[in-house]
Amino acid sequence: MRSVISILDLSVEELDELIATANDIIADPEKYAHICQGKKLATMFFEPSTRTRLSFEAAMYELGGNVLTMADAQSSSAAKGESVADTVKTISCYADIIAMRHPKEGAPYVASLNASVPVINAGDGGHNHPTQTLADLLTIQREKGRLGELTVGFCGDLKFGRTVHSLIQALSRYQNVKFVLISPVELKLPSYVKKDIIQANRLQYVQTTDLEKVMPDLDILYMTRVQRERFFNEEDYLRLKDSYILTVDKLKNAKPDLAIMHPLPRVNEISVAVDKDPRACYFKQVLNGKYMRMALILKLLGVKP
Ligand code: CP
Protein backbone atom coordinates (compact mmCIF):
# COMPACT_ATOMS: atom_id res chain seq x y z
CA MET A 1 0.00 0.00 0.00
CA ARG A 2 1.53 3.23 -1.17
CA SER A 3 0.56 6.90 -0.82
CA VAL A 4 1.69 9.98 -2.77
CA ILE A 5 2.18 12.97 -0.50
CA SER A 6 5.04 14.70 -2.35
CA ILE A 7 6.00 14.53 -6.03
CA LEU A 8 9.35 13.21 -4.75
CA ASP A 9 7.51 10.05 -3.66
CA LEU A 10 7.56 9.14 -7.37
CA SER A 11 10.84 8.34 -9.14
CA VAL A 12 11.67 9.83 -12.55
CA GLU A 13 11.04 6.37 -14.06
CA GLU A 14 7.59 6.30 -12.43
CA LEU A 15 6.81 9.81 -13.73
CA ASP A 16 7.74 8.60 -17.23
CA GLU A 17 5.52 5.55 -16.73
CA LEU A 18 2.55 7.75 -15.61
CA ILE A 19 3.03 10.03 -18.62
CA ALA A 20 3.10 6.98 -20.92
CA THR A 21 -0.09 5.62 -19.32
CA ALA A 22 -1.83 9.00 -19.64
CA ASN A 23 -0.87 9.21 -23.32
CA ASP A 24 -2.19 5.68 -23.84
CA ILE A 25 -5.49 6.62 -22.13
CA ILE A 26 -5.76 9.65 -24.44
CA ALA A 27 -5.13 7.42 -27.48
CA ASP A 28 -7.45 4.57 -26.45
CA PRO A 29 -9.90 5.53 -23.65
CA GLU A 30 -12.12 2.47 -24.29
CA LYS A 31 -9.29 0.17 -23.15
CA TYR A 32 -9.54 1.75 -19.68
CA ALA A 33 -13.31 2.38 -19.48
CA HIS A 34 -14.18 -0.53 -17.12
CA ILE A 35 -10.81 -1.29 -15.58
CA CYS A 36 -11.70 -0.05 -12.06
CA GLN A 37 -15.16 -1.63 -11.88
CA GLY A 38 -15.99 -2.34 -8.22
CA LYS A 39 -13.36 0.10 -6.90
CA LYS A 40 -14.20 3.28 -4.97
CA LEU A 41 -12.35 6.58 -4.71
CA ALA A 42 -13.13 8.88 -1.76
CA THR A 43 -12.49 12.58 -2.28
CA MET A 44 -11.99 14.37 1.07
CA PHE A 45 -11.76 18.10 0.49
CA PHE A 46 -11.39 20.38 3.52
CA GLU A 47 -10.60 23.37 1.24
CA PRO A 48 -12.41 24.64 -1.91
CA SER A 49 -11.61 23.10 -5.28
CA THR A 50 -13.08 22.91 -8.76
CA ARG A 51 -10.44 21.19 -10.92
CA THR A 52 -8.72 18.81 -8.53
CA ARG A 53 -11.80 17.30 -6.91
CA LEU A 54 -13.89 17.07 -10.06
CA SER A 55 -11.01 15.76 -12.18
CA PHE A 56 -10.29 13.03 -9.61
CA GLU A 57 -13.97 12.12 -9.68
CA ALA A 58 -14.18 12.25 -13.50
CA ALA A 59 -10.98 10.15 -13.62
CA MET A 60 -12.50 7.40 -11.45
CA TYR A 61 -15.78 7.39 -13.38
CA GLU A 62 -13.88 7.16 -16.70
CA LEU A 63 -12.05 4.11 -15.30
CA GLY A 64 -15.39 2.47 -14.52
CA GLY A 65 -15.15 2.97 -10.74
CA ASN A 66 -17.29 4.81 -8.22
CA VAL A 67 -16.80 7.90 -6.07
CA LEU A 68 -17.62 8.88 -2.48
CA THR A 69 -17.47 12.65 -2.00
CA MET A 70 -16.78 14.84 0.98
CA ALA A 71 -16.79 18.21 -0.73
CA ASP A 72 -16.21 20.37 2.36
CA ALA A 73 -15.38 20.02 6.05
CA GLN A 74 -18.78 21.35 7.14
CA SER A 75 -20.59 18.39 5.57
CA SER A 76 -18.57 15.82 7.58
CA SER A 77 -18.02 15.00 11.25
CA ALA A 78 -14.80 17.06 11.07
CA ALA A 79 -17.21 19.92 11.84
CA LYS A 80 -17.94 18.18 15.18
CA GLY A 81 -14.23 17.99 15.98
CA GLU A 82 -13.28 14.57 14.58
CA SER A 83 -9.55 14.29 13.87
CA VAL A 84 -8.00 13.68 10.44
CA ALA A 85 -6.69 10.35 11.76
CA ASP A 86 -10.12 9.10 12.84
CA THR A 87 -11.73 10.42 9.65
CA VAL A 88 -9.36 8.49 7.36
CA LYS A 89 -9.55 5.33 9.49
CA THR A 90 -13.30 5.53 8.91
CA ILE A 91 -13.12 6.28 5.18
CA SER A 92 -10.62 3.41 4.73
CA CYS A 93 -13.54 1.10 5.65
CA TYR A 94 -15.55 2.36 2.66
CA ALA A 95 -13.09 3.29 -0.12
CA ASP A 96 -10.12 1.70 -1.92
CA ILE A 97 -8.20 4.97 -2.36
CA ILE A 98 -8.45 8.51 -0.94
CA ALA A 99 -7.66 11.92 -2.50
CA MET A 100 -7.38 14.54 0.24
CA ARG A 101 -7.03 18.33 0.27
CA HIS A 102 -6.51 20.17 3.54
CA PRO A 103 -5.59 23.77 4.50
CA LYS A 104 -3.00 22.49 7.03
CA GLU A 105 0.43 21.56 5.69
CA GLY A 106 1.14 17.91 6.47
CA ALA A 107 -2.48 16.83 7.02
CA PRO A 108 -2.47 14.37 4.05
CA TYR A 109 0.78 12.91 5.44
CA VAL A 110 -0.92 12.35 8.81
CA ALA A 111 -3.82 10.81 6.90
CA SER A 112 -1.44 8.42 5.07
CA LEU A 113 -0.04 7.20 8.41
CA ASN A 114 -3.53 6.32 9.63
CA ALA A 115 -5.27 5.07 6.48
CA SER A 116 -5.29 1.45 5.40
CA VAL A 117 -5.69 2.47 1.72
CA PRO A 118 -3.50 4.74 -0.46
CA VAL A 119 -3.78 8.48 0.21
CA ILE A 120 -3.08 11.07 -2.50
CA ASN A 121 -2.24 14.63 -1.44
CA ALA A 122 -4.61 16.86 -3.44
CA GLY A 123 -3.02 20.02 -2.01
CA ASP A 124 -1.96 20.82 1.57
CA GLY A 125 -1.97 24.50 2.51
CA GLY A 126 0.95 26.42 1.00
CA HIS A 127 3.10 23.27 0.88
CA ASN A 128 2.69 20.77 -1.98
CA HIS A 129 0.30 19.82 -4.80
CA PRO A 130 1.82 16.75 -6.47
CA THR A 131 -1.08 15.87 -8.77
CA GLN A 132 -1.11 19.41 -10.22
CA THR A 133 2.54 18.73 -11.00
CA LEU A 134 1.56 15.54 -12.82
CA ALA A 135 -0.82 17.64 -14.94
CA ASP A 136 1.96 20.17 -15.53
CA LEU A 137 4.52 17.53 -16.52
CA LEU A 138 2.19 15.94 -19.08
CA THR A 139 1.45 19.41 -20.47
CA ILE A 140 5.14 20.29 -20.76
CA GLN A 141 5.93 16.92 -22.34
CA ARG A 142 3.14 17.28 -24.91
CA GLU A 143 3.81 20.97 -25.67
CA LYS A 144 7.62 21.01 -25.66
CA GLY A 145 8.41 17.34 -26.37
CA ARG A 146 10.82 17.20 -23.42
CA LEU A 147 11.12 17.75 -19.66
CA GLY A 148 14.77 18.87 -19.66
CA GLU A 149 16.75 21.59 -21.48
CA LEU A 150 14.21 24.24 -20.49
CA THR A 151 14.23 27.73 -18.99
CA VAL A 152 11.16 27.89 -16.76
CA GLY A 153 9.87 31.17 -15.31
CA PHE A 154 7.67 31.03 -12.20
CA CYS A 155 5.81 34.29 -11.62
CA GLY A 156 3.62 35.60 -8.79
CA ASP A 157 3.22 34.06 -5.34
CA LEU A 158 6.21 31.75 -5.05
CA LYS A 159 6.02 31.75 -1.24
CA PHE A 160 2.62 30.12 -0.72
CA GLY A 161 2.25 28.69 -4.24
CA ARG A 162 2.18 24.93 -3.57
CA THR A 163 1.98 24.15 -7.29
CA VAL A 164 5.28 26.01 -7.78
CA HIS A 165 7.00 24.13 -4.95
CA SER A 166 5.98 20.72 -6.31
CA LEU A 167 6.82 21.54 -9.94
CA ILE A 168 10.29 22.84 -9.01
CA GLN A 169 10.88 19.63 -7.03
CA ALA A 170 9.91 17.57 -10.08
CA LEU A 171 11.82 19.56 -12.73
CA SER A 172 14.95 19.64 -10.54
CA ARG A 173 15.46 15.98 -11.48
CA TYR A 174 15.68 16.61 -15.25
CA GLN A 175 18.78 17.73 -17.18
CA ASN A 176 19.60 21.41 -17.70
CA VAL A 177 16.46 23.03 -16.34
CA LYS A 178 17.07 26.68 -15.45
CA PHE A 179 14.67 28.39 -13.04
CA VAL A 180 13.72 32.07 -13.30
CA LEU A 181 11.97 33.12 -10.08
CA ILE A 182 9.83 36.23 -10.59
CA SER A 183 8.03 37.60 -7.53
CA PRO A 184 7.68 40.54 -5.18
CA VAL A 185 10.29 40.38 -2.39
CA GLU A 186 7.56 39.46 0.14
CA LEU A 187 6.48 36.41 -1.93
CA LYS A 188 9.88 34.87 -2.69
CA LEU A 189 10.35 31.10 -2.87
CA PRO A 190 10.67 29.56 0.66
CA SER A 191 14.09 28.28 1.66
CA TYR A 192 12.97 24.64 1.87
CA VAL A 193 12.59 24.79 -1.91
CA LYS A 194 15.33 27.28 -2.84
CA LYS A 195 18.05 25.96 -0.52
CA ASP A 196 17.05 22.31 -0.22
CA ILE A 197 16.16 21.72 -3.87
CA ILE A 198 17.66 24.37 -6.17
CA GLN A 199 20.87 25.24 -4.33
CA ALA A 200 21.47 21.75 -2.87
CA ASN A 201 21.40 20.30 -6.40
CA ARG A 202 23.51 23.19 -7.81
CA LEU A 203 20.80 24.07 -10.33
CA GLN A 204 20.87 27.27 -12.35
CA TYR A 205 18.47 30.00 -11.20
CA VAL A 206 17.93 33.74 -11.21
CA GLN A 207 15.65 35.79 -8.96
CA THR A 208 14.02 38.98 -10.19
CA THR A 209 11.01 41.23 -9.72
CA ASP A 210 10.92 42.18 -13.44
CA LEU A 211 8.82 39.84 -15.62
CA GLU A 212 9.24 41.78 -18.87
CA LYS A 213 13.02 41.83 -18.61
CA VAL A 214 13.29 38.03 -18.48
CA MET A 215 10.39 37.27 -20.85
CA PRO A 216 12.61 36.69 -23.97
CA ASP A 217 14.60 33.98 -22.13
CA LEU A 218 11.67 31.78 -21.19
CA ASP A 219 10.56 28.46 -22.71
CA ILE A 220 7.78 28.20 -20.13
CA LEU A 221 6.05 30.95 -18.15
CA TYR A 222 4.19 29.52 -15.13
CA MET A 223 1.90 32.26 -13.79
CA THR A 224 0.30 31.95 -10.34
CA ARG A 225 -2.43 33.68 -8.38
CA VAL A 226 -1.67 35.78 -5.30
CA GLN A 227 -3.79 33.76 -2.85
CA ARG A 228 -5.96 35.85 -0.56
CA GLU A 229 -6.62 32.80 1.68
CA ARG A 230 -2.93 32.45 2.60
CA PHE A 231 -2.46 36.02 3.92
CA PHE A 232 -2.71 36.89 7.60
CA ASN A 233 -3.81 40.46 6.87
CA GLU A 234 -5.91 41.93 4.08
CA GLU A 235 -3.67 44.99 3.75
CA ASP A 236 -0.69 42.91 2.55
CA TYR A 237 -2.90 41.00 0.12
CA LEU A 238 -4.32 44.21 -1.39
CA ARG A 239 -0.83 45.68 -1.77
CA LEU A 240 0.55 42.60 -3.56
CA LYS A 241 -2.38 41.14 -5.48
CA ASP A 242 -1.80 43.04 -8.75
CA SER A 243 2.00 42.69 -8.79
CA TYR A 244 1.94 40.84 -12.13
CA ILE A 245 -0.76 40.94 -14.78
CA LEU A 246 0.15 39.17 -18.02
CA THR A 247 -1.26 40.99 -21.04
CA VAL A 248 -0.95 40.51 -24.81
CA ASP A 249 1.41 43.51 -24.90
CA LYS A 250 3.77 42.02 -22.31
CA LEU A 251 4.18 38.93 -24.50
CA LYS A 252 5.54 40.87 -27.51
CA ASN A 253 9.16 39.86 -26.77
CA ALA A 254 8.37 36.29 -25.77
CA LYS A 255 9.57 33.25 -27.74
CA PRO A 256 7.16 32.10 -30.49
CA ASP A 257 7.02 28.65 -28.86
CA LEU A 258 6.65 29.85 -25.26
CA ALA A 259 4.21 27.73 -23.22
CA ILE A 260 2.07 29.92 -20.94
CA MET A 261 0.91 27.86 -17.98
CA HIS A 262 -1.19 28.49 -14.86
CA PRO A 263 -2.61 25.91 -12.42
CA LEU A 264 -5.84 27.96 -12.18
CA PRO A 265 -8.03 29.36 -10.73
CA ARG A 266 -7.02 32.73 -12.11
CA VAL A 267 -8.25 36.03 -10.78
CA ASN A 268 -6.74 38.76 -12.97
CA GLU A 269 -3.07 37.75 -13.32
CA ILE A 270 -3.58 36.64 -16.92
CA SER A 271 -5.70 38.91 -19.06
CA VAL A 272 -8.59 37.02 -20.71
CA ALA A 273 -7.32 38.33 -24.10
CA VAL A 274 -4.23 36.09 -23.67
CA ASP A 275 -6.50 33.01 -23.84
CA LYS A 276 -6.66 33.42 -27.65
CA ASP A 277 -2.87 33.17 -27.93
CA PRO A 278 -1.97 29.65 -29.18
CA ARG A 279 0.78 29.60 -26.58
CA ALA A 280 -1.78 29.64 -23.73
CA CYS A 281 -1.82 26.12 -22.23
CA TYR A 282 -3.76 26.51 -18.98
CA PHE A 283 -6.96 24.83 -20.13
CA LYS A 284 -4.88 22.00 -21.61
CA GLN A 285 -3.40 21.57 -18.11
CA VAL A 286 -6.94 21.15 -16.75
CA LEU A 287 -7.66 18.28 -19.15
CA ASN A 288 -4.23 16.71 -18.76
CA GLY A 289 -4.82 16.66 -14.99
CA LYS A 290 -7.69 14.23 -15.45
CA TYR A 291 -5.58 11.83 -17.52
CA MET A 292 -2.63 11.91 -15.10
CA ARG A 293 -4.96 11.33 -12.14
CA MET A 294 -6.40 8.33 -14.00
CA ALA A 295 -2.85 7.03 -14.47
CA LEU A 296 -2.01 7.61 -10.78
CA ILE A 297 -5.17 5.88 -9.53
CA LEU A 298 -4.31 2.84 -11.68
CA LYS A 299 -0.74 2.77 -10.39
CA LEU A 300 -1.66 3.03 -6.70
CA LEU A 301 -4.44 0.44 -7.02
CA GLY A 302 -2.11 -1.87 -8.96
CA VAL A 303 -4.61 -2.15 -11.82
CA LYS A 304 -3.31 -2.85 -15.34
CA PRO A 305 -5.21 -2.95 -18.66
N1 CP B 1 -5.30 23.82 -9.75
C1 CP B 1 -6.13 23.54 -8.71
O1 CP B 1 -5.72 22.94 -7.69
O2 CP B 1 -7.40 23.99 -8.87
P1 CP B 1 -8.58 23.78 -7.83
O3 CP B 1 -8.22 24.58 -6.58
O4 CP B 1 -9.83 24.30 -8.51
O5 CP B 1 -8.67 22.33 -7.49
Image: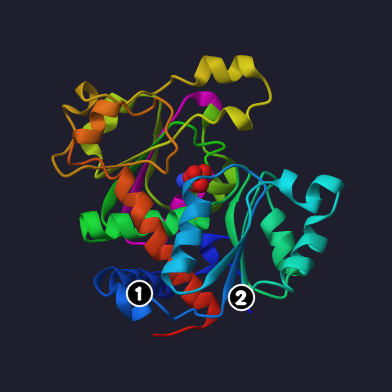
- SS label for mark 2: loop
The residue nearer to you, when weighing 261 against 169, is 261
Instruction: Check if residue 164 falls in the magenta segment.
Output: yes
Give residue 270's position: percent from left, percent from top: 34, 29
Mark pair 1, 2: CA separation: 18 Å
Q: Is 303 located above or below residue 151 in the figure?
A: below
Q: Residue at x 16, y 38 (%)?
A: 255
Let me know if residue 213 appears in the view. no
Which one is in front, 241 or 158?
241
User: Looking at the image, which residue is at 86% across and 48% down?
Assistant: 81
Q: Residue at x 74, y 60 (%)?
A: 110
Q: Quadrant of the C terminus?
A: bottom left
Please determine whether, in this image, residue 30 is positioned above or below residue 265. Answer: below
Query: Disc 2 designates what residue?
Result: 2
Mark 1 residue's CB less than 8 Å from ligand 1: no
Q: Is residue 192 magenta?
A: no
Q: Write down the region rendered in magenta.
A: 162-186
Q: Nearer the viewer, residue 281 or 177?
A: 281
* Beta carbon at label 2 within 8 Å of ligand 1: no
Relative vertical location of residue 60 with respect to residue 261 in this rendering, above or below:
below
Percent position (x, y) of residue 136? 37, 53
Q: Position of residue 32 (x, y in %)?
A: 37, 77
What amino acid is labelled 1 in the image?
A: Thr
Residue at mark 1 = 21
Tell me the mark number nearer the camera, choosing from 1 and 2.
1
> Residue 134 occupies which quadrant of the picture?
bottom left
Tag 2 or tag 1, which sits nearer the N-term?
A: 2
Q: Quadrant of residue 213?
A: top left
Please report the residue visible at 23 percent of the width from the left and 38 percent of the height from the top. 217
